[in-house]
Image: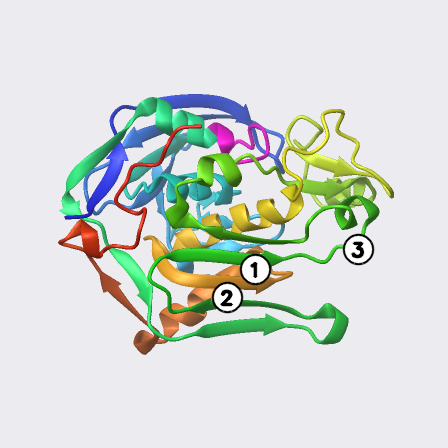
């Protein structure tokens, strides 16, 4: 049986929110089978659970925000969810002491480290996948403003993403990336890609109450010509790889791993969530499956993710 996974022990981190700038403590705890990933706001008078789900995404401005039925929010969840997807974690409690998940280094690598340091435990319950049965696509804009995202049937989980920023620093890198989750190389090839921003947009974002905790230690920042970070890029295609990192996290808002081929052009958090909602709205487009025999599962999915 291909089993569900949780943590062996709890682990903690402290950081600041990318957009709020607030200090936040994060505790990752094991959870029982079929719990899913549940954020818990423990800073409130009465702790409030915010389960992960496509319909729970309420804001997609520069990040993915979840909200409970009573309106309690958890912001910027996509990097942590991407790490959970990359390591195949199904069940997890995430206690936080503020509204926003800490940005840490701006990638998913710190979350991968935290999760792997706590250890991954197999559970006595079958892992449930959301398998796409027929293609679903959403789009926005026309001509030079066109954006789209698509999920198509595939025995595994692959991602293909193309960006188009038309900026000297971005143009000099690869703007199209493909990745196969079954390769077991998420930690090495995707997790370290950082979020990025243009210096000319930072003040505008801050005036809107966003990016208050952002800086060169947790994001790639560019002026009109170049990358301002003294250490440069971590990957030759770091910009496109971060968009894949984000997409993995956004799609994990489905509440379970997806079996599909995802492809996108200039997509973002909003379009990724629209894609998920379009899929789930069509009951004939997907099914929930398990694998009693691990050999029938997609290649690479039965193995625990390798460390760095």
Q: Nearer the viewer, residue 302 or 133?
A: 302
Q: Are marks 2 and 1 in contact (CB under 8 Å)?
A: yes
Real-space Cα distance between discs 3 and 1? 21 Å
In this figure, which residue is indicated by the disc labeled 3? 166
Observer-nearest of 230 and 66: 230
Residue 55 or 99: which is nearer the viewer?
55
User: Is 89 placed left or right of 243 in the picture?
Assistant: left
**Relative to 284, 177 lies left or right:** right
Label 1 neighbour load within 10 Å: few <14, some 14-19, many 20+:
some
Q: Nearer the viewer, mark 3 or mark 1?
A: 3
Q: Is residue 254 above or below residue 214?
A: below
Q: Residues within 10 Å of mark 3 (few under 14, many from 20)?
A: few
Say which residue appears at 31% left-offset and 64% top-offset: 131
Question: How many C-alpha atoms fall within 10 Å of the one at disc 2: few (<14), some, or many (≥20)?
Answer: some
Q: Quadrant of residue 231?
A: top right
Residue identified by numbered label 2: 274
Segment colored magenta: 99-110
């Amino acid at each position: 049986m291909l089993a569900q996974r949780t943590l062996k022990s709890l682990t903690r981190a402290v950081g600041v929110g990318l957009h709020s700038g607030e200090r936040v403590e994060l505790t990752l705890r094991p959870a029982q089978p079929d719990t899913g990933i549940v954020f818990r706001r423990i800073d409130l008078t009465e702790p409030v659970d915010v389960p992960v789900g496509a319909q729970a995404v309420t804001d997609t401005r520069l990040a993915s925000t979840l909200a409970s039925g009573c309106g309690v929010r958890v912001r910027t969840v996509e990097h942590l969810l991407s790490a959970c997807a990359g390591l195949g974690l199904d069940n997890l409690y995430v206690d936080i002491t503020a509204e926003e998940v800490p940005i840490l280094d701006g990638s998913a690598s710190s979350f991968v480290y935290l999760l792997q340091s706590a250890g991954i435990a197999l559970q006595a319950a079958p892992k449930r996948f959301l398998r796409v049965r027929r293609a679903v696509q959403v789009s926005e804009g026309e001509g030079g403003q066109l954006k789209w995202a698509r999920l198509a049937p595939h025995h595994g989980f692959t991602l293909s993403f193309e960006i188009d920023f038309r900026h000297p620093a971005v143009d000099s890198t690869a703007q199209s990336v493909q990745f196969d989750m079954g390769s077991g190389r998420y930690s090495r090839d995707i997790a370290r890609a950082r979020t990025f921003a243009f210096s000319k947009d930072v003040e505008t974002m801050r005036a809107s109450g966003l990016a208050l905790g952002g800086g060169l230690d947790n994001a790639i920042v560019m002026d009109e010509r170049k990358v301002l970070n003294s250490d440069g890029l971590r990957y030759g295609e770091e910009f496109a790889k971060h968009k894949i990192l984000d997409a993995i996290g956004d799609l994990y808002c489905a509440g379970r791993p997806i079996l599909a081929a995802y492809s996108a052009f200039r997509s973002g958090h909003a379009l990724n969530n629209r894609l998920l909602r379009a899929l789930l709205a069509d009951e004939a487009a997907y099914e929930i499956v398990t694998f009693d025999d691990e050999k029938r599962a997609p290649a690479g999915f039965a193995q625990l993710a390798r460390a760095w």
